[in-house]
Amino acid sequence: MCTDCVQKEYPNRGNTCLENGSFLLNYVGCAKCNHRDFMLINNKTTEEEDGEEIVTYDHVCKNCHHIIARHEYTFSVVDDYQEYTMLCMLCGKAEDTISVLPDDPRRMAPLF
Protein backbone atom coordinates (compact mmCIF):
# COMPACT_ATOMS: atom_id res chain seq x y z
CA MET A 1 0.00 0.00 0.00
CA CYS A 2 1.36 3.37 -1.00
CA THR A 3 0.64 6.56 0.90
CA ASP A 4 2.21 8.66 -1.89
CA CYS A 5 -0.46 7.54 -4.40
CA VAL A 6 -3.44 8.84 -2.42
CA GLN A 7 -4.52 12.35 -1.53
CA LYS A 8 -5.85 11.34 1.92
CA GLU A 9 -5.36 8.04 3.73
CA TYR A 10 -8.58 6.24 4.71
CA PRO A 11 -10.99 9.15 4.09
CA ASN A 12 -14.29 8.98 5.96
CA ARG A 13 -16.93 7.97 3.41
CA GLY A 14 -19.90 7.94 5.80
CA ASN A 15 -22.17 5.10 4.71
CA THR A 16 -20.80 4.65 1.14
CA CYS A 17 -19.45 1.10 1.09
CA LEU A 18 -18.02 -0.07 -2.24
CA GLU A 19 -18.05 -3.79 -2.99
CA ASN A 20 -16.02 -3.11 -6.13
CA GLY A 21 -14.56 -0.15 -7.97
CA SER A 22 -12.22 2.68 -6.96
CA PHE A 23 -12.57 6.15 -5.43
CA LEU A 24 -10.72 8.03 -8.17
CA LEU A 25 -11.17 11.46 -6.57
CA ASN A 26 -8.71 10.38 -3.86
CA TYR A 27 -6.14 9.07 -6.36
CA VAL A 28 -3.20 11.45 -6.93
CA GLY A 29 -1.41 9.17 -9.38
CA CYS A 30 1.08 6.35 -9.25
CA ALA A 31 4.13 7.31 -7.22
CA LYS A 32 6.22 4.67 -9.00
CA CYS A 33 5.63 5.56 -12.68
CA ASN A 34 4.11 9.06 -12.28
CA HIS A 35 1.04 8.25 -14.41
CA ARG A 36 -2.52 9.10 -13.41
CA ASP A 37 -4.59 6.54 -15.26
CA PHE A 38 -7.29 4.02 -14.48
CA MET A 39 -6.50 1.31 -11.96
CA LEU A 40 -6.85 -2.42 -12.26
CA ILE A 41 -8.38 -4.70 -9.66
CA ASN A 42 -6.17 -7.70 -8.95
CA ASN A 43 -6.23 -10.65 -6.56
CA LYS A 44 -9.97 -10.38 -5.89
CA THR A 45 -11.23 -12.95 -3.42
CA THR A 46 -14.64 -13.57 -1.87
CA GLU A 47 -14.85 -15.61 1.31
CA GLU A 48 -17.68 -16.49 3.63
CA GLU A 49 -16.84 -16.89 7.27
CA ASP A 50 -19.45 -17.38 10.02
CA GLY A 51 -22.20 -15.85 7.86
CA GLU A 52 -20.09 -12.84 6.89
CA GLU A 53 -19.08 -12.25 3.27
CA ILE A 54 -15.60 -10.74 2.91
CA VAL A 55 -14.41 -9.32 -0.43
CA THR A 56 -10.78 -8.26 -0.77
CA TYR A 57 -8.74 -7.01 -3.70
CA ASP A 58 -5.78 -4.83 -4.64
CA HIS A 59 -5.97 -1.51 -6.48
CA VAL A 60 -3.08 -1.70 -8.97
CA CYS A 61 -1.58 0.85 -11.39
CA LYS A 62 -2.60 0.00 -14.95
CA ASN A 63 0.83 0.96 -16.33
CA CYS A 64 3.41 -0.48 -13.93
CA HIS A 65 1.29 -2.79 -11.68
CA HIS A 66 2.34 -0.93 -8.52
CA ILE A 67 0.00 -1.84 -5.62
CA ILE A 68 -1.77 1.35 -4.59
CA ALA A 69 -4.07 0.02 -1.87
CA ARG A 70 -5.74 -3.10 -0.48
CA HIS A 71 -9.55 -2.98 -0.38
CA GLU A 72 -11.74 -4.90 2.10
CA TYR A 73 -15.54 -4.99 2.03
CA THR A 74 -17.74 -7.01 4.39
CA PHE A 75 -21.43 -7.87 4.38
CA SER A 76 -23.41 -9.66 7.06
CA VAL A 77 -26.93 -10.00 8.40
CA VAL A 78 -27.30 -9.42 12.13
CA ASP A 79 -30.80 -9.80 13.60
CA ASP A 80 -33.06 -7.79 11.25
CA TYR A 81 -30.28 -5.68 9.70
CA GLN A 82 -27.85 -5.94 6.81
CA GLU A 83 -24.45 -4.57 7.85
CA TYR A 84 -21.81 -3.32 5.41
CA THR A 85 -18.26 -2.13 6.07
CA MET A 86 -15.43 -0.92 3.85
CA LEU A 87 -11.79 -0.28 4.71
CA CYS A 88 -9.29 0.88 2.08
CA MET A 89 -6.51 3.48 2.03
CA LEU A 90 -7.78 4.74 -1.35
CA CYS A 91 -11.57 4.33 -1.06
CA GLY A 92 -11.80 5.13 2.65
CA LYS A 93 -13.63 3.73 5.62
CA ALA A 94 -17.40 3.42 5.88
CA GLU A 95 -20.16 1.55 7.65
CA ASP A 96 -23.84 1.15 6.86
CA THR A 97 -26.76 -0.72 8.41
CA ILE A 98 -30.06 -1.27 6.60
CA SER A 99 -33.17 -2.90 7.99
CA VAL A 100 -34.44 -5.98 6.14
CA LEU A 101 -37.98 -5.12 7.29
CA PRO A 102 -40.26 -2.96 5.11
CA ASP A 103 -40.48 -0.34 7.89
CA ASP A 104 -37.24 0.33 9.72
CA PRO A 105 -38.08 0.21 13.46
CA ARG A 106 -35.24 2.66 14.19
CA ARG A 107 -36.93 5.44 12.24
CA MET A 108 -39.63 7.44 13.90
CA ALA A 109 -43.07 7.46 12.35
CA PRO A 110 -44.08 10.74 10.67
CA LEU A 111 -46.07 13.12 12.87
CA PHE A 112 -48.67 13.84 10.19
Image: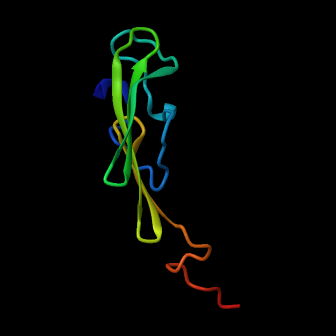
Residue 8, x across and y down, in percent: 36, 37
Position of residue 54 in the picture relative to residue 105 (left or right): left
Pick the residue in front: 73 or 63.
73
Q: Residue at x 36, y 54 (%)?
A: 51
Position of residue 95 in the picture relative to residue 105 (left or right): left
Pick the residue in front: 108 or 34.
108
**Above or below for 97 versus 45:** below
Quarter of the picture holding the C terminus: bottom right
Q: Residue at x 33, y 12 (%)?
A: 32
Pick the residue in front: 100 or 86.
100
The colour style of the image is rainbow
**Above or below for 49 versus 101:** above
Position of residue 66 in the picture relative to residue 63 (left or right): left
Residue 53, x across and y down, in percent: 39, 47
Residue 78, x across and y down, in percent: 39, 66
Residue 81, x across and y down, in percent: 46, 67
Q: Residue at x 46, y 14 (%)?
A: 62
Residue extending furthest right? Answer: 112
Residue extending furthest bottom? Answer: 112
